[in-house]
Image (cartoon, rainbow, N blue to C red):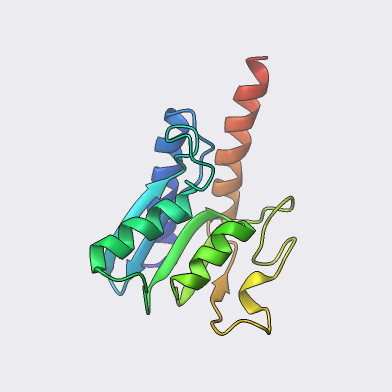
């Protein structure tokens, strides 16, 4: 599977989250060809401010492999990770993070902060951005446009 294929799976998770009233962000964690976890945002559903799609997927993937370290894994997420998620990605020792659209108001990979390549850290994460960026951005934009129209 290609990065775009995995991102399509993450987009499906984002759309499922939107159907539950969550901000439509989706994540997939793969190790080689194996999908370890898929998740969407659950902050509202779980009343948990840390239940971003990335964190939910990291928790599930760690349980699936029986280790808090996800050495060699790639995390695909529809939107650039925030600082909290970037920290969790580093703690999990994710090898690579691939995301869809930038988050100019809070992105911690490239837009607002550059957490993944901070020189003081002992683990660096390879980052690829712009995978199906237009589709990822449109998913968010349509969600928020619908919310605004409701008043």
Which residue is painted at 48% across and 71% down in the image?
A: 91
Q: Quadrant of residue 33?
A: bottom left
Name the quarter where the C terminus is drawn: top right
The vertical placement of 107 against 72, above or below, is above
- Quadrant of the rendered structure where residue 95 is? bottom left
x and y percentages locating residue 47 in the rendered image: 48, 34
- Taking the view exactly as shown, the residue that stands out farthest to the top is 151
Q: Position of residue 31 (x, y in %)?
A: 32, 72
On screen, residue 97 versus residue 145, left or right, reads left
- Determine the residue positioned at 37% across, 74% down: 69
Residue at 51 percent across and 45 percent down: it is 25
Question: Residue 34: percent from the left, percent from the top?
Answer: 26, 67
- In the picture, which quadrant includes the N terminus? bottom left
Residue at 50% across / 67% down in the picture?
89
Residue 49 drawn above or below residue 90: above
Q: Is residue 81 visible?
A: no
Left or right position of 41 against 108: left
Towards the viewer: 102 or 88: 88
For residue 93, above or below residue 138: below
Count the labels in the image.
0
């Amino acid at each position: 599977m290609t990065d775009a294929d995995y991102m399509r799976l993450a987009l499906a998770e984002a759309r499922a989250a939107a159907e539950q009233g969550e901000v439509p962000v989706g994540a997939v964690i793969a190790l080689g060809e194996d999908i370890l976890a898929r998740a969407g945002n659950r902050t509202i559903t779980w009343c948990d401010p840390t239940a971003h799609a990335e964190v939910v997927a990291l928790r599930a993937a760690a349980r699936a492999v029986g280790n808090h370290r996800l050495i060699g894994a790639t995390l695909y997420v529809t939107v650039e990770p925030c600082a909290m998620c970037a920290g969790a990605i580093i703690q999990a020792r994710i090898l690579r993070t691939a995301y869809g659209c930038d988050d100019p108001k809070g992105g911690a990979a490239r837009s607002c902060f550059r957490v993944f390549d901070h020189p003081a850290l002992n683990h660096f994460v390879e980052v690829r951005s712009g995978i199906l960026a237009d589709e990822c951005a449109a998913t968010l934009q349509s969600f928020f446009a619908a919310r605004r129209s409701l008043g």
